[in-house]
Image (spheres, coloured by chain):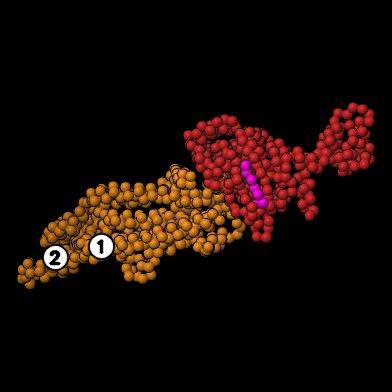
Chain colours: A red, B orange
């Protein structure tokens, strides 16, 4: 288990991360979200021992992360880096060896990974000759080829096209299924919700939300209705508790002040009988994120 | 665990650089330059026209015979009854020069495109001819004339710290050697400094360093890189030792390269190995210093700027090497030649010129090793601070500040 306790980092009089607590169990994914500068990368840097925390501890199975444990730790930085003039084989095998993998095993695993991720290119190709998408796949392979027990992914979907994003998500889920502990940061809220067992949201270094995605969403109540029904906007806006209404695709999206207002909306919408869609849901993670950011700016 | 990772980083650094054309160009450039010079000298000697110059001597059979018999002058003298005949032969390119005499004074008329004639030797022969003629007029015996005109012989022995060199004063050759050595050492040093700087700056600017440090430690990266490039320098030295062995066996056997042989006369294996050791340790020393400053750059375009202070440092010793010849007792040069960061050019040059003894060179080497140990120990801390920090501002200033803070606790 990875356990962050009271993790704090101050740069001069600026607090980058404030008393962060977090636990990640084997086979669990923690999504770390927040605006740029919220403290996500600083948190990763403290976990990786790139910088020393001002306060607090990082423990892996109740012990500090030593050189032995680092061998089973994979890290994908936000700004990707590969040796452009080296061959795919040379550099992936180099990274694998640094993580304690035998060269011969790494070569077999690399062939397997390249096939699985549909990398267009040969092991003997230089990275500079690969397309951006294929280079990103090689970067992922270099991060996970040694089957890490603990994986840190800083913005893993940044710069990826939808196909590669999906591919990346599948691999993260595969690693999770194999028992890896994964912490990742992302601005892709759909991805965060899909992958994460738990979410931590940071704002100016402070933890503002933490928990399972469904629990977090439910904290805000079922205040969102998506409706496809033959009823006028005026009739809907006249219902007490309906705060806002806007067109959304083939239907309308209603924002409620109180989730209890949903019953009345349902009654008005179904007054003439059958309607194709009535969905009352908590706000999306994306909406919660925006709301929290806006709240932070108001403070 | 860390030792295994250290060896992996060393191997990767060594092999990736070994495959580059730049490394082999660095190793082979001096060899190619020496080979090119030797080739040109050989070619010049081999294609030289050895036909003796044809010199027409007007009216004096004795002089004609004297010129013909002088081996040092190496001419074919032809006697002519008068100047007109000789002039005709000169015009028809049958002669390279004509020599006429009037009351002990001589006039030499040369063809512009004729064979070269050594005028200094000719002057000696003519002086001897005049002396002999006057001696005959004075009824002196030939033996007496020889005794009177014999010049004293001077044999030069150079007493140095290595003992007495029976081969004489070789100061010009020694100076050439010291300067050449200084240039080569400076070239190697700056090349290896450039290599380590590129290596670290590339990994830092491309963020590969973050991936590497997630798996290893700054110490493994720091010493692994220096070790890998150090191995390249060691291989470089080994290649020169092997080439030196080959040259030492074959060079004396090539008569056309006697001049080169003469320049290398003062060099022995002790000197060569000591020079290699001093240079190798200094390369490591400079690499440690460079690794510290290169860890500060944010992108590759800042590398030159960041390592500028290191280059200035190495240039100081290099420039002083040009002044060392003829200054065996200069206190400043002697003191500086022991100091780490400067001794790599000065001490081998002093040793080569026989201004310094082998024990003195050992002292310089020992001081270099101590400096290397201290710099590596304290430098790792600064490297660790710099390698994951991306700072804005004047990189040279930051580099100086970083170096100033090296030994602060």
Left or right of B79, for residue B250: right
Secondary structure under tag 1 reads loop
**Residue drawn 60% across the image and 37% down it:** A137
Q: What is the chain identity of the residue bearing mark 1?
A: B
Whether residue A5 is in magenta: the answer is: yes
Whether residue B24 is situated above or below residue B290 in the rendered picture: above
Tell me residue A110's x, y (percent): 53, 34
The disc placed on residue B129 is 2
**Image position of B107 (left or right of A194):** left
Residue B195, position in %: x, y? 47, 51
- Alpha-carbon distance for marks 1 and 2? 46 Å
The first of marks 1 and 2 along the sequence is 2
Q: What label does residue B6 carry, if any? A: none
Q: Are there few (<14), some (14-19), or many (20+) residues within 10 Å of tag 2?
A: some
Magenta segment:
A1-7
Dot 2 falls on a residue whose secondary structure is: helix
Residue under the point 55% across and 31% down: A112
In the image, B239 versus B7, the foreground residue is: B7
Q: Using the image, determine if residue B313 lies above or below residue B207.
A: below
Q: Give the image location of residue B271, x and y in percent.
A: 30, 57
Nearer the camera: disc 1 or disc 2? 1
Question: What residue sits right under mark 1 in the picture?
Answer: B162
């Amino acid at each position: 288990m990875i356990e962050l306790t009271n993790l704090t980092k101050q740069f001069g009089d600026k607090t980058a991360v404030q008393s962060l607590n977090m636990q990640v169990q084997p086979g669990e994914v923690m999504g770390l979200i927040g605006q740029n500068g919220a403290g996500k990368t600083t948190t990763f840097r403290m976990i990786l021992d790139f910088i020393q925390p001002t306060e607090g501890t990082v423990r892996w199975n109740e012990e500090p992360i030593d050189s032995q444990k680092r061998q089973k730790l994979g890290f994908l930085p936000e700004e990707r880096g590969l040796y452009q003039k080296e061959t795919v084989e040379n550099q992936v095998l180099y990274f694998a060896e640094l993580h304690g993998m035998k060269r011969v095993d790494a070569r077999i695993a690399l062939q397997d990974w390249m096939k699985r991720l549909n990398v267009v290119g040969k092991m003997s190709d230089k990275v500079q000759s690969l397309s951006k998408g294929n280079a990103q796949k090689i970067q992922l392979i270099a991060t996970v080829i040694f089957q890490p027990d603990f994986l840190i992914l800083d913005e893993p979907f940044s710069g990826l096209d939808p196909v590669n994003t999906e591919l990346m998500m599948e691999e993260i889920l595969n690693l999770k299924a194999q028992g890896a502990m994964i912490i990742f940061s992302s601005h892709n809220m759909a991805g965060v919700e899909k992958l994460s067992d738990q979410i931590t949201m940071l704002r100016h270094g402070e933890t503002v939300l933490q928990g399972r995605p469904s629990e977090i969403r439910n904290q805000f109540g079922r205040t969102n209705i998506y409706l496809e029904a033959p009823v006028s906007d005026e009739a809907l806006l006249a219902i007490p508790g309906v705060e806002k209404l806007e067109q959304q695709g083939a239907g309308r999206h209603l924002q409620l002040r109180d989730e209890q207002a949903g019953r009345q909306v349902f009654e008005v919408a179904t007054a003439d009988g059958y309607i194709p869609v009535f969905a009352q849901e908590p706000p999306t993670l994306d909406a919660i994120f925006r709301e929290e950011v806006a709240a932070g700016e108001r403070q | 665990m860390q030792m295994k990772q250290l060896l992996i980083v060393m191997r990767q650094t060594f092999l990736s650089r070994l495959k580059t054309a730049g490394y082999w160009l660095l190793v082979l450039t001096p060899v190619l330059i020496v080979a090119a010079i030797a080739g040109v000298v050989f070619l010049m000697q081999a294609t030289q026209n050895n036909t003796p110059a044809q010199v027409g001597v007007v009216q004096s059979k004795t002089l004609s015979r004297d010129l013909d018999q002088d081996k040092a002058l190496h001419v074919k003298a032809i006697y002519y009854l008068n100047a007109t005949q000789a002039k005709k032969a000169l015009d028809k390119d049958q002669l390279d020069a004509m020599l006429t005499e009037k009351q002990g004074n001589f006039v030499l008329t040369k063809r512009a495109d004729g064979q070269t004639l050594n005028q200094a030797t000719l002057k000696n022969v003519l002086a001897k001819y005049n002396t002999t003629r006057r001696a005959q007029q004075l009824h002196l015996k030939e033996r007496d004339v020889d005794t009177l005109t014999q010049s004293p012989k001077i044999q030069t022995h150079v007493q140095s710290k290595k003992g007495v060199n029976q081969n004489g004063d070789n100061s010009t050759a020694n100076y050439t050697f010291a300067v050449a050595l200084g240039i080569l050492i400076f070239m190697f040093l700056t090349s290896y400094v450039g290599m380590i700087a590129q290596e670290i700056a590339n990994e830092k600017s491309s963020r590969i360093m973050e991936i590497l440090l997630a798996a290893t430690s700054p110490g493994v990266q720091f010493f692994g890189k220096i070790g890998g490039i150090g191995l390249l320098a060691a291989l470089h030295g080994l290649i020169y030792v092997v080439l030196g062995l080959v040259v030492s066996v074959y060079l004396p056997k090539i008569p056309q390269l006697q001049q080169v042989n003469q320049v290398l006369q003062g060099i022995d294996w002790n000197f060569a190995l000591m020079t290699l050791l001093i240079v190798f340790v200094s390369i490591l020393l400079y690499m440690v210093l460079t690794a510290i400053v290169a860890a500060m750059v944010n992108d590759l375009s800042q590398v030159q700027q960041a390592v500028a202070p290191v280059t200035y440092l190495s240039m100081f010793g290099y420039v002083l090497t040009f002044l060392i010849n003829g200054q065996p007792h200069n206190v400043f040069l002697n003191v500086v030649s022991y100091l780490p960061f400067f001794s790599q050019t000065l001490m081998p040059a002093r040793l080569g010129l026989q201004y310094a003894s082998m024990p003195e060179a050992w002292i310089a080497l020992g001081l270099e090793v101590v400096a290397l140990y201290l710099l590596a120990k304290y430098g790792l801390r600064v490297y660790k601070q710099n390698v994951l920090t991306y700072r804005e501002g004047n990189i040279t200033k930051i580099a100086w500040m970083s170096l100033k803070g090296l030994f602060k606790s």
